[in-house]
Protein backbone atom coordinates (compact mmCIF):
# COMPACT_ATOMS: atom_id res chain seq x y z
CA UNK A 1 0.00 0.00 0.00
CA UNK A 2 1.27 3.46 -0.87
CA UNK A 3 0.57 6.28 1.55
CA UNK A 4 0.50 9.91 0.47
CA UNK A 5 -1.20 12.62 -1.49
CA UNK A 6 -1.38 14.44 -4.79
CA UNK A 7 0.95 17.26 -5.80
CA UNK A 8 0.38 20.50 -3.92
CA UNK A 9 -2.19 22.70 -5.67
CA UNK A 10 -0.12 25.79 -4.86
CA UNK A 11 3.58 26.38 -4.30
CA UNK A 12 4.68 25.54 -0.77
CA UNK A 13 7.98 25.26 1.02
CA UNK A 14 7.03 21.84 2.32
CA UNK A 15 5.26 19.38 0.06
CA UNK A 16 2.68 16.80 1.07
CA UNK A 17 3.50 13.15 0.52
CA UNK A 18 2.27 11.51 -2.69
CA UNK A 19 -1.18 9.92 -2.63
CA UNK A 20 -2.37 6.39 -3.12
CA UNK A 21 -5.87 5.70 -4.40
CA UNK A 22 -6.83 3.73 -1.29
CA UNK A 23 -6.09 6.66 1.02
CA UNK A 24 -7.87 9.14 -1.22
CA UNK A 25 -10.89 6.86 -1.34
CA UNK A 26 -10.84 6.51 2.45
CA UNK A 27 -10.86 10.28 2.82
CA UNK A 28 -13.86 10.58 0.48
CA UNK A 29 -15.77 7.92 2.42
CA UNK A 30 -15.12 9.39 5.84
CA UNK A 31 -18.40 11.07 6.82
CA UNK A 32 -18.79 14.82 6.95
CA UNK A 33 -18.43 16.12 10.49
CA UNK A 34 -15.80 13.57 11.53
CA UNK A 35 -12.66 15.51 12.38
CA UNK A 36 -9.65 13.25 12.93
CA UNK A 37 -6.26 14.77 13.56
CA UNK A 38 -3.02 14.71 15.49
CA UNK A 39 -1.87 16.73 18.47
CA UNK A 40 0.81 18.54 16.43
CA UNK A 41 2.35 18.40 12.95
CA UNK A 42 6.11 18.89 13.46
CA UNK A 43 7.54 15.35 13.25
CA UNK A 44 10.32 14.55 10.75
CA UNK A 45 9.49 10.84 11.12
CA UNK A 46 6.28 11.45 9.19
CA UNK A 47 8.14 11.55 5.90
CA UNK A 48 6.12 9.44 3.45
CA UNK A 49 3.10 9.55 5.74
CA UNK A 50 2.38 13.28 5.77
CA UNK A 51 5.41 15.00 4.20
CA UNK A 52 7.25 14.23 1.00
CA UNK A 53 10.80 15.11 2.01
CA UNK A 54 13.10 15.10 5.01
CA UNK A 55 12.62 18.27 7.05
CA UNK A 56 13.85 19.47 10.41
CA UNK A 57 11.36 19.64 13.25
CA UNK A 58 11.64 23.43 13.50
CA UNK A 59 10.99 23.80 9.76
CA UNK A 60 7.89 21.61 9.98
CA UNK A 61 6.62 23.53 13.00
CA UNK A 62 6.87 26.83 11.11
CA UNK A 63 5.88 25.76 7.61
CA UNK A 64 4.38 22.26 7.65
CA UNK A 65 0.74 22.92 8.49
CA UNK A 66 -0.39 23.61 4.92
CA UNK A 67 1.04 20.27 3.76
CA UNK A 68 -0.43 18.47 6.77
CA UNK A 69 -3.88 19.85 5.95
CA UNK A 70 -3.79 18.18 2.51
CA UNK A 71 -3.98 14.71 4.08
CA UNK A 72 -7.27 13.07 3.03
CA UNK A 73 -8.02 11.85 6.57
CA UNK A 74 -6.47 14.55 8.77
CA UNK A 75 -9.20 17.19 8.92
CA UNK A 76 -8.17 18.67 12.26
CA UNK A 77 -5.16 19.33 14.45
CA UNK A 78 -4.53 20.08 18.09
CA UNK A 79 -2.91 23.35 19.08
CA UNK A 80 -0.87 22.55 22.17
CA UNK A 81 1.30 25.67 22.02
CA UNK A 82 -1.52 27.63 23.59
CA UNK A 83 -1.26 25.46 26.71
CA UNK A 84 2.27 26.65 27.46
CA UNK A 85 1.75 30.32 26.75
CA UNK A 86 -1.13 32.45 25.45
CA UNK A 87 -1.14 33.05 21.70
CA UNK A 88 -2.09 36.30 20.00
CA UNK A 89 -5.01 36.63 17.62
CA UNK A 90 -2.46 37.06 14.81
CA UNK A 91 -0.92 33.66 15.65
CA UNK A 92 -4.28 31.96 15.33
CA UNK A 93 -5.06 33.87 12.13
CA UNK A 94 -1.77 32.74 10.62
CA UNK A 95 -2.66 29.11 11.30
CA UNK A 96 -6.17 29.53 9.92
CA UNK A 97 -4.83 30.99 6.68
CA UNK A 98 -2.88 27.79 5.96
CA UNK A 99 -5.77 25.33 5.99
CA UNK A 100 -8.98 24.75 3.98
CA UNK A 101 -12.36 26.05 5.08
CA UNK A 102 -13.53 22.65 6.34
CA UNK A 103 -10.48 22.14 8.57
CA UNK A 104 -10.84 22.49 12.36
CA UNK A 105 -8.51 23.25 15.28
CA UNK A 106 -8.81 21.86 18.79
CA UNK A 107 -7.21 24.46 21.05
CA UNK A 108 -5.96 23.93 24.60
CA UNK A 109 -6.45 26.68 27.16
CA UNK A 110 -3.30 28.03 28.84
CA UNK A 111 -2.07 26.12 31.88
CA UNK A 112 -1.92 29.51 33.60
CA UNK A 113 -5.70 29.24 34.08
CA UNK A 114 -6.15 25.44 34.20
CA UNK A 115 -3.48 24.43 36.71
CA UNK A 116 -4.45 24.90 40.35
CA UNK A 117 -0.82 25.23 41.41
CA UNK A 118 2.38 26.91 40.30
CA UNK A 119 4.89 24.22 39.40
CA UNK A 120 8.46 24.12 40.61
CA UNK A 121 11.40 21.98 39.50
CA UNK A 122 10.29 18.65 38.07
CA UNK A 123 6.67 19.76 37.97
CA UNK A 124 6.10 19.49 41.70
CA UNK A 125 3.51 21.90 43.19
CA UNK A 126 5.23 24.95 44.65
CA UNK A 127 2.35 27.29 45.49
CA UNK A 128 -1.31 27.96 44.76
CA UNK A 129 -1.95 29.54 41.36
CA UNK A 130 -3.77 32.86 41.87
CA UNK A 131 -5.02 32.78 38.26
CA UNK A 132 -6.59 29.31 38.44
CA UNK A 133 -10.02 29.45 36.74
CA UNK A 134 -9.72 33.21 36.31
CA UNK A 135 -12.57 34.15 33.96
CA UNK A 136 -11.03 37.44 32.80
CA UNK A 137 -7.66 35.86 32.04
CA UNK A 138 -9.25 32.94 30.18
CA UNK A 139 -11.47 35.27 28.16
CA UNK A 140 -8.86 37.86 27.23
CA UNK A 141 -5.87 35.55 26.76
CA UNK A 142 -7.58 32.57 25.18
CA UNK A 143 -11.25 32.59 24.21
CA UNK A 144 -11.44 35.90 22.35
CA UNK A 145 -8.10 35.74 20.47
CA UNK A 146 -8.64 32.09 19.50
CA UNK A 147 -12.14 32.62 18.16
CA UNK A 148 -11.29 35.91 16.43
CA UNK A 149 -8.17 34.47 14.82
CA UNK A 150 -9.54 31.09 13.76
CA UNK A 151 -13.10 32.13 12.91
CA UNK A 152 -15.19 29.26 11.56
CA UNK A 153 -12.15 26.96 11.78
CA UNK A 154 -12.24 27.02 15.59
CA UNK A 155 -13.25 23.66 17.02
CA UNK A 156 -13.34 22.73 20.71
CA UNK A 157 -11.72 25.03 23.26
CA UNK A 158 -10.41 22.48 25.74
CA UNK A 159 -9.68 23.32 29.35
CA UNK A 160 -7.39 20.51 30.53
CA UNK A 161 -7.12 20.51 34.31
CA UNK A 162 -3.60 19.59 35.33
CA UNK A 163 -3.27 16.86 37.98
CA UNK A 164 -4.62 18.21 41.24
CA UNK A 165 -3.13 17.75 44.72
CA UNK A 166 -4.90 14.96 46.62
CA UNK A 167 -6.41 17.22 49.31
CA UNK A 168 -8.42 19.03 46.59
CA UNK A 169 -10.04 15.77 45.51
CA UNK A 170 -11.75 14.83 48.76
CA UNK A 171 -14.86 15.85 50.66
CA UNK A 172 -15.89 19.48 50.74
CA UNK A 173 -12.83 20.55 48.74
CA UNK A 174 -14.01 18.43 45.81
CA UNK A 175 -17.55 19.81 46.06
CA UNK A 176 -16.19 23.34 46.11
CA UNK A 177 -14.00 22.67 43.08
CA UNK A 178 -16.92 21.37 41.02
CA UNK A 179 -19.00 24.39 42.00
CA UNK A 180 -16.12 26.67 41.02
CA UNK A 181 -15.84 24.95 37.65
CA UNK A 182 -19.54 25.49 37.06
CA UNK A 183 -19.30 29.18 37.91
CA UNK A 184 -16.22 29.55 35.71
CA UNK A 185 -17.81 28.05 32.60
CA UNK A 186 -21.07 29.92 33.15
CA UNK A 187 -19.15 33.21 33.22
CA UNK A 188 -17.19 32.62 30.00
CA UNK A 189 -18.50 34.27 26.81
CA UNK A 190 -21.49 32.32 25.51
CA UNK A 191 -21.48 34.05 22.12
CA UNK A 192 -18.63 35.63 20.15
CA UNK A 193 -19.45 37.32 16.86
CA UNK A 194 -22.77 35.50 16.78
CA UNK A 195 -21.22 32.06 17.31
CA UNK A 196 -21.43 29.90 20.42
CA UNK A 197 -17.99 28.69 21.54
CA UNK A 198 -17.60 24.94 22.05
CA UNK A 199 -16.11 24.55 25.52
CA UNK A 200 -14.84 21.18 26.76
CA UNK A 201 -13.29 20.02 30.02
CA UNK A 202 -10.56 17.38 30.13
CA UNK A 203 -9.60 15.74 33.42
CA UNK A 204 -6.34 14.26 34.63
CA UNK A 205 -7.79 12.94 37.91
CA UNK A 206 -10.38 10.19 37.69
CA UNK A 207 -11.73 11.17 41.11
CA UNK A 208 -13.23 14.29 39.54
CA UNK A 209 -15.51 12.31 37.23
CA UNK A 210 -18.46 12.34 39.62
CA UNK A 211 -22.23 12.62 39.13
CA UNK A 212 -21.98 16.16 40.52
CA UNK A 213 -19.48 17.12 37.81
CA UNK A 214 -21.61 15.48 35.13
CA UNK A 215 -24.65 17.50 36.25
CA UNK A 216 -22.56 20.69 36.34
CA UNK A 217 -21.27 20.23 32.79
CA UNK A 218 -24.74 19.44 31.55
CA UNK A 219 -26.14 22.59 33.17
CA UNK A 220 -23.44 24.83 31.65
CA UNK A 221 -23.45 23.23 28.18
CA UNK A 222 -19.79 22.20 28.45
CA UNK A 223 -18.71 18.94 26.84
CA UNK A 224 -16.70 16.32 28.68
CA UNK A 225 -13.54 15.76 26.65
CA UNK A 226 -12.60 12.10 26.87
CA UNK A 227 -8.94 12.29 27.88
CA UNK A 228 -7.35 8.92 27.13
CA UNK A 229 -4.32 8.83 29.36
CA UNK A 230 -2.64 6.27 31.59
CA UNK A 231 -3.92 7.96 34.74
CA UNK A 232 -7.54 8.08 33.59
CA UNK A 233 -10.20 5.36 33.12
CA UNK A 234 -10.31 3.79 29.68
CA UNK A 235 -12.44 5.14 26.85
CA UNK A 236 -15.41 2.87 27.53
CA UNK A 237 -15.60 3.80 31.21
CA UNK A 238 -15.30 7.50 30.44
CA UNK A 239 -18.02 7.21 27.82
CA UNK A 240 -20.46 6.12 30.54
CA UNK A 241 -20.08 9.57 32.12
CA UNK A 242 -20.71 11.14 28.72
CA UNK A 243 -23.81 9.00 28.29
CA UNK A 244 -25.07 10.02 31.73
CA UNK A 245 -24.53 13.67 30.86
CA UNK A 246 -26.60 13.32 27.69
CA UNK A 247 -29.33 11.11 29.15
CA UNK A 248 -32.97 12.14 28.93
CA UNK A 249 -36.30 10.49 29.64
CA UNK A 250 -37.15 10.04 25.98
CA UNK A 251 -33.87 8.53 24.81
CA UNK A 252 -35.26 5.00 24.67
CA UNK A 253 -32.67 2.40 23.74
CA UNK A 254 -30.69 4.49 21.26
CA UNK A 255 -28.18 6.80 22.92
CA UNK A 256 -27.91 10.18 21.24
CA UNK A 257 -25.32 12.82 22.02
CA UNK A 258 -26.67 16.22 23.03
CA UNK A 259 -23.50 17.92 21.85
CA UNK A 260 -20.27 17.26 19.95
CA UNK A 261 -17.97 14.35 20.73
CA UNK A 262 -14.54 15.58 21.88
CA UNK A 263 -11.66 13.14 22.42
CA UNK A 264 -7.94 13.50 23.06
CA UNK A 265 -6.12 10.15 22.85
CA UNK A 266 -2.83 11.14 24.49
CA UNK A 267 -1.00 8.09 25.78
CA UNK A 268 -0.96 4.33 25.57
CA UNK A 269 -2.25 2.62 28.71
CA UNK A 270 0.46 1.71 31.18
CA UNK A 271 3.17 3.98 29.75
CA UNK A 272 4.66 7.26 30.95
CA UNK A 273 5.19 10.07 28.43
CA UNK A 274 8.99 9.82 28.34
CA UNK A 275 8.85 6.04 28.18
CA UNK A 276 6.41 6.21 25.26
CA UNK A 277 8.45 8.88 23.49
CA UNK A 278 11.60 6.78 23.62
CA UNK A 279 9.78 3.62 22.61
CA UNK A 280 7.89 5.10 19.65
CA UNK A 281 10.29 7.68 18.14
CA UNK A 282 10.53 8.57 15.26
CA UNK A 283 6.75 7.91 15.18
CA UNK A 284 6.66 6.35 11.73
CA UNK A 285 4.90 3.05 12.53
CA UNK A 286 2.32 1.51 14.81
CA UNK A 287 3.94 -0.42 17.63
CA UNK A 288 1.33 -1.03 20.36
CA UNK A 289 -1.99 -1.46 18.59
CA UNK A 290 -4.96 -0.78 20.86
CA UNK A 291 -7.92 -2.39 19.11
CA UNK A 292 -10.19 -1.93 22.15
CA UNK A 293 -9.75 1.85 22.23
CA UNK A 294 -10.08 2.17 18.47
CA UNK A 295 -13.28 0.15 18.52
CA UNK A 296 -14.72 2.24 21.35
CA UNK A 297 -13.89 5.48 19.53
CA UNK A 298 -15.34 4.22 16.25
CA UNK A 299 -18.57 3.36 18.10
CA UNK A 300 -18.68 6.82 19.71
CA UNK A 301 -18.15 8.45 16.31
CA UNK A 302 -21.08 6.43 14.97
CA UNK A 303 -23.19 7.63 17.92
CA UNK A 304 -22.20 11.22 17.08
CA UNK A 305 -23.16 10.71 13.45
CA UNK A 306 -26.50 9.21 14.43
CA UNK A 307 -27.05 12.18 16.72
CA UNK A 308 -26.26 14.77 14.07
CA UNK A 309 -23.24 15.93 16.07
CA UNK A 310 -19.64 16.52 14.94
CA UNK A 311 -16.87 14.30 16.32
CA UNK A 312 -13.41 15.67 17.11
CA UNK A 313 -10.76 13.04 17.82
CA UNK A 314 -7.17 14.20 18.31
CA UNK A 315 -4.47 11.53 18.58
CA UNK A 316 -0.95 11.74 19.97
CA UNK A 317 1.98 9.73 18.61
CA UNK A 318 2.25 8.19 22.07
CA UNK A 319 -1.11 6.44 21.74
CA UNK A 320 0.06 3.64 19.42
CA UNK A 321 3.34 4.88 17.93
CA UNK A 322 2.29 7.04 14.97
CA UNK A 323 -0.65 9.42 15.18
CA UNK A 324 -1.30 9.69 11.40
CA UNK A 325 -1.42 5.90 11.08
CA UNK A 326 -3.74 5.65 14.08
CA UNK A 327 -6.07 8.18 12.42
CA UNK A 328 -6.03 6.17 9.20
CA UNK A 329 -6.91 2.96 11.03
CA UNK A 330 -9.62 4.73 13.01
CA UNK A 331 -11.07 6.11 9.76
CA UNK A 332 -11.14 2.59 8.36
CA UNK A 333 -13.01 1.39 11.43
CA UNK A 334 -15.53 4.20 11.01
CA UNK A 335 -16.25 3.50 7.34
CA UNK A 336 -16.17 -0.26 7.79
CA UNK A 337 -13.06 -1.14 5.77
Image (cartoon, rainbow, N blue to C red):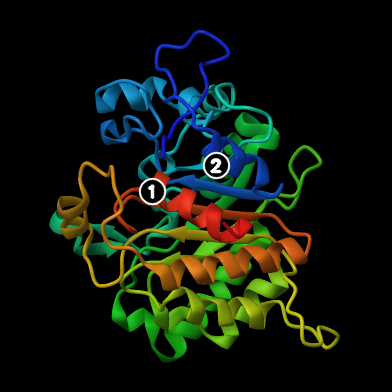
Crowding near pointer 1: few (<14 within 10 Å), some, many (20+)?
many
In this rendered view, identify the residue nearer to me: 223 or 272: 272
Query: Mark 1 = which residue?
Result: 323
**Residue 147, labelled with which disc?**
none
Q: Position of residue 78 (x, y in %)?
A: 47, 44
Q: CA distance from mark 2 to mark 1?
A: 12 Å
Residue 198 seen anywhere in this rendered image of the structure = yes
The residue carrying pointer 2 sits among few (fewer than 14), some (14 to 19) or many (20 or more) residues within 10 Å by Cα, namely many
In this rendering, the answer to whether 45 lies above or below 161 is above
Which residue, given by chain and number where applicable, does mark 2 sit on? Answer: 73
Of mark 2 and mark 1, the one earlier in the sequence is: 2
Q: Quadrant of the C terminus?
A: bottom right
Residue in the image at 42% along x and 63% along y = 161
Q: Residue furthest front?
A: 1
Say which of 132 and 332 sits in front: 332
Placement of 254 over or under 318, stated as above or below: below
| Residue 328 drawn at (x, y percent) | 48, 48
Can the viewer see residue 158 in this picture? no
Residue 307 placement (x, y as % from top left): 77, 66
Q: Is residue 202 left or right of residue 230?
A: right
Q: Residue at x 76, y 66 (%)?
A: 306
Residue 298 lies, in percent from the top left, at 57, 65
Give the residue at x 44% y 54%. Answer: 113
Who's the residue at 58% across and 87% down the image?
Answer: 211
Per the image, label 2 sits on a secondary structure element best described as loop
Position of the N terminus, as image quadrant, is top left
Quadrant hosting residue 253: bottom right
Amino acid sequence: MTLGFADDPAPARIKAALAGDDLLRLGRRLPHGVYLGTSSWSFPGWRGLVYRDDRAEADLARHGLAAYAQHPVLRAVGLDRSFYRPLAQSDYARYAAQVPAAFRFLIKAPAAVTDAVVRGDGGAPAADNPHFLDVAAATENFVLPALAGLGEKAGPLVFQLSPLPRPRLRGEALVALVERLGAFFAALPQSVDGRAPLYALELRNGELMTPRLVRTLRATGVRLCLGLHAKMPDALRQSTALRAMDASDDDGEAWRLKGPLVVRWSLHAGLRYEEARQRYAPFDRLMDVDVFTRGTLAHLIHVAQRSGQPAYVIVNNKAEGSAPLTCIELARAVVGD
